[in-house]
């Protein structure tokens, strides 16, 4: 270590050189330890960091694009929403099951269409009709994950002013977080949403560093607007509130009154109002009321589902950030309580340290906003992963050799515990342990558990042995190597074996086969869009028994789906209604039943019951349609169905859909259904149970 002319007191820290000045009597400090193999590998990868990050994500995702079916509830619903975008031209206001879908804005589905066009041009769209199948939707998840990783790298470089090595480490942190890898295999818009928010952070921070920066500020506001049109108003809240707090911390609140801020706000409002005007012109004004009151205000203040206490994310974030939550016990927390730690916090208000201050403000502000909102789901934490990844990478790479050893030993114990849990689950399946079945609420028919357990045990052994010499770089490299290997059997073997309880495909395709035979599809209190994609046609989704009774009575042939508890309590169930399938989907058992009579019942429909003018599903090109028979005096219009044709059970059925203005869409009943069935299911949101049986 070098010593300056103005030497501080013996044994004290030199704040300028960040070194320790020894006593005069102390001999020269020993040379720094020799760089490890892992550190040299990290240096090589850091030469062009985006290339190894892209390759690693490809290895973690590309082999699994066709491995499994679409799962309940988001994947199958968003697939049907995208069908409406392509086949019915619903580019501005999304539609689900033939009716407007106010839950989500359209930007993510525009990205899916761009990916679909690219895959078709490259000849890799697969066998799904029009390229609309699992391969497309899982490609959308992977591309969104790639955008987020790239944005995180840029956040480290431009905001934290990190070197390439630390920025690469931030990407490796994401690629080794178990939850992030799971989400990169699940078709949702959250990763794109988080990527756009991160880009907004980068642009706004770059602009705030200057007295005036119209380009960067306008770009920051524009990305925030696009994030809002991807998932919702949190796309504005995260970057804009962070910016206000950051400028207050820097003592520059007047910066918000600049002309460039006014220009950025104007561009943001133009983008948002353009979509609002488009929605107003294509739908009724009630649709906008639904968006602003029900989807935004009610979800933020008094949500009807996924309501959790304010401390919910304090309990779930540590689990979602594994394995890097284990970094906390090995950090030198004594530094934060020291005078030097206090001086370091104060120094974050200087231009040299303001980037790290912005990252901390972005993380803490985002955490506070999410904790204040009524609805709480783990996946909503994703926008916080980017700043947290940069901070985590810096912490890992700055660890001493001894602290890095303890980190890797803790990670080894975690993987060993994972291996033990997988072995226990496998033995429970083999021997039918009742206590285990009740504990996990799962049918215990998972495959590939032995392989996953073996990989976990091997990873634990390697981590333990390598711990003394690997350093922080070794922890990063071995962690991402483990997740890349571990995800292969999980995605290719275990996840597909979960289809029978996570995907409504089996019952959806069964319903579709009956629709082709002229049956009218009816569901009762089934979450909207559950069956539509795999059935290949819109279904009559009802929430009142009187409507179900009227629909079944009015048609000669009907196929009905509902939960078992409703099937068992159906008071007016026709005696000739025949059950054809039972399936557990996530945590509810569903029944599909059919009825065929020589003529519709002449049952009198109670006053006020509306089952008329239901969804028309045009026949595919070259086919002719047929109508279900109805009494001559019936006020119920028939459901036009495509003529029967051969069905490929492995291919997704497509539907060219025209919306129905009379489709029941009562908000209160939809809220009841959401509360009963759950909403916005993500890979780590809920356990599942049961099996599938076709009779």
Image: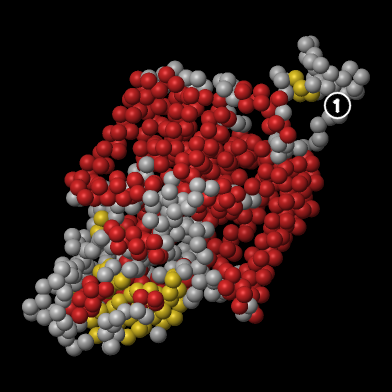
Question: Helix, strand, or loop for circle 1?
Answer: loop
In the rendered image, residue 373, in percent from the top left (x then y), is placed at 43, 45
The part of the image, by quadrant, that contains residue 403 is: top right
171 vs 120, left or right, is right
Q: Is residue 174 above or below residue 364?
A: below
Q: Residue at x 38, y 56 (%)?
A: 304
Neighbourhood count class around disc 1 (C-alpha, 10 Å): few under 14, some 14–19, many 20 upward: few
Q: Decide if residue 327 is in sight here.
A: yes
Q: Is residue 152 something that shows in the picture?
A: no
From the viewer's perspective, tell me whether residue 227 is left or right of residue 657: right
The single residue placed furthest to the top in the displayed view is: 5
Residue at image position (56%, 29%) is 357
Residue 287: percent from the left, percent from the top?
24, 50
Which residue is nearer to you in this view: 685 or 538? 685
Depth check, front residue: 577 or 165: 577
Occupied quadrant, residue 491: bottom right
Relative to 17, say whether 277 is above or below: below
In terms of depth relative to the viewer, which is nearer, 194 or 655? Answer: 194
The quadrant of the rendering that contains the C terminus is bottom left
Q: Can you identify the residue that label 1 sits on?
A: 29
On the picture, is 6 further left or further right than 550?
Answer: right
Q: What residue is at 58 percent from the left and 20 percent from the top?
A: 350
């Amino acid at each position: 270590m070098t010593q300056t002319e103005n030497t501080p007191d013996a044994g004290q820290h030199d704040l300028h050189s960040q070194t320790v000045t020894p006593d005069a009597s102390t001999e020269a400090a020993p040379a720094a330890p020799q760089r490890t193999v892992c550190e040299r590998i990290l240096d090589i990868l850091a030469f062009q960091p985006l290339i190894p990050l892209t390759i690693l994500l490809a290895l973690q995702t590309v082999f699994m694009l066709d491995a499994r079916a679409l799962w309940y509830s988001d994947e199958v619903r968003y697939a049907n929403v995208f069908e409406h975008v392509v086949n019915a031209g619903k580019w501005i206001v999304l539609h689900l099951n033939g009716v407007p879908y106010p839950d989500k804005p359209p930007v993510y589905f525009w990205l899916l269409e761009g990916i679909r066009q690219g895959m078709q041009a490259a000849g890799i769209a697969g066998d799904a009709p029009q390229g609309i199948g699992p391969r497309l939707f899982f490609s959308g998840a992977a591309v969104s994950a790639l955008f987020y990783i790239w944005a995180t790298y840029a956040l480290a470089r431009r905001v934290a002013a990190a070197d390439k090595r630390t920025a690469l480490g931030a990407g490796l942190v994401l690629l080794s977080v178990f939850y992030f890898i799971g989400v990169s295999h699940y078709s949702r818009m959250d990763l794109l949403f988080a990527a756009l928010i991160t880009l907004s952070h980068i642009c706004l921070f770059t602009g705030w560093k200057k007295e005036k920066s119209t380009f960067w500020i306008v770009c920051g506001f524009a990305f925030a607007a696009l994030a809002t049109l991807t998932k919702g108003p949190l796309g504005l809240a995260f970057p804009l509130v962070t910016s206000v707090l950051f400028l207050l911390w820097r003592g520059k609140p007047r910066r918000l009154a600049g002309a460039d801020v006014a220009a950025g706000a104007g561009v943001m409002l133009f983008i948002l109002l353009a979509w609002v005007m488009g929605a107003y012109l294509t739908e009724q004004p009630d649709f906008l009321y639904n968006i602003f009151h029900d989807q935004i205000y009610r979800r933020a203040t008094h949500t009807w589902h996924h309501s959790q206490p304010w401390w919910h994310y304090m309990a779930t974030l540590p689990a979602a950030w594994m394995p890097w939550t284990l970094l906390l016990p090995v950090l030198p927390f004594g530094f934060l309580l020291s005078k030097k730690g206090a001086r370091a916090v104060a120094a974050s208000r200087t231009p040299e340290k303001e980037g790290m201050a912005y990252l901390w403000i972005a993380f803490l502000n985002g955490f506070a906003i999410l904790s204040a909102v009524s609805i709480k789901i783990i996946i909503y934490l994703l926008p916080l992963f980017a700043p947290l990844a940069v901070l985590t990478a810096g912490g890992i790479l700055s660890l001493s050799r001894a602290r890095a050893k303890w980190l890797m030993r803790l990670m080894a114990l975690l993987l060993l515990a994972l291996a033990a849990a997988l072995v226990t689950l496998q033995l429970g399946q083999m021997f039918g342990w009742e206590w285990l079945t009740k504990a996990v609420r799962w049918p215990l028919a998972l495959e590939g558990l032995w392989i996953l357990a073996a990989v976990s045990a091997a990873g634990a052994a390697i981590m333990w042995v390598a711990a003394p010499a690997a350093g922080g770089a070794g922890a990063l490299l071995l962690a991402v190597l483990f997740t890349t290997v571990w995800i292969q059997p999980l995605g290719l073997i275990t996840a597909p074996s979960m289809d029978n309880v996570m995907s409504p495909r089996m019952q959806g395709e069964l319903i579709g086969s009956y629709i082709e035979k002229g049956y009218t599809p009816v569901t009762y209190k089934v979450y909207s869009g559950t069956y539509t994609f795999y059935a290949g046609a819109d279904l009559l989704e009802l929430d009142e028994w009187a409507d179900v009774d009227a629909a079944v009575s009015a048609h000669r042939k009907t196929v009905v789906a509902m939960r078992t508890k409703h099937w068992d309590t159906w008071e007016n169930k026709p005696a000739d209604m025949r059950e054809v399938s039972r399936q557990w989907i996530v945590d509810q058992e569903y029944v599909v039943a059919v009825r065929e009579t020589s003529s519709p019942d002449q049952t009198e429909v109670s006053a006020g019951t509306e089952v008329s003018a239901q969804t028309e599903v045009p026949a595919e090109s070259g086919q002719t349609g047929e109508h279900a028979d109805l009494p001559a005096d019936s006020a119920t219009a028939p459901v036009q169905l495509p003529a029967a044709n051969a069905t490929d059970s492995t291919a997704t059925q497509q539907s060219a859909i025209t919306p129905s203005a009379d489709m029941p869409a009562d908000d209160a009943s939809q809220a009841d259904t959401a509360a009963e069935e759950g909403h916005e299911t993500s890979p780590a949101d809920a356990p599942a149970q049961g099996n599938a049986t076709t009779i």
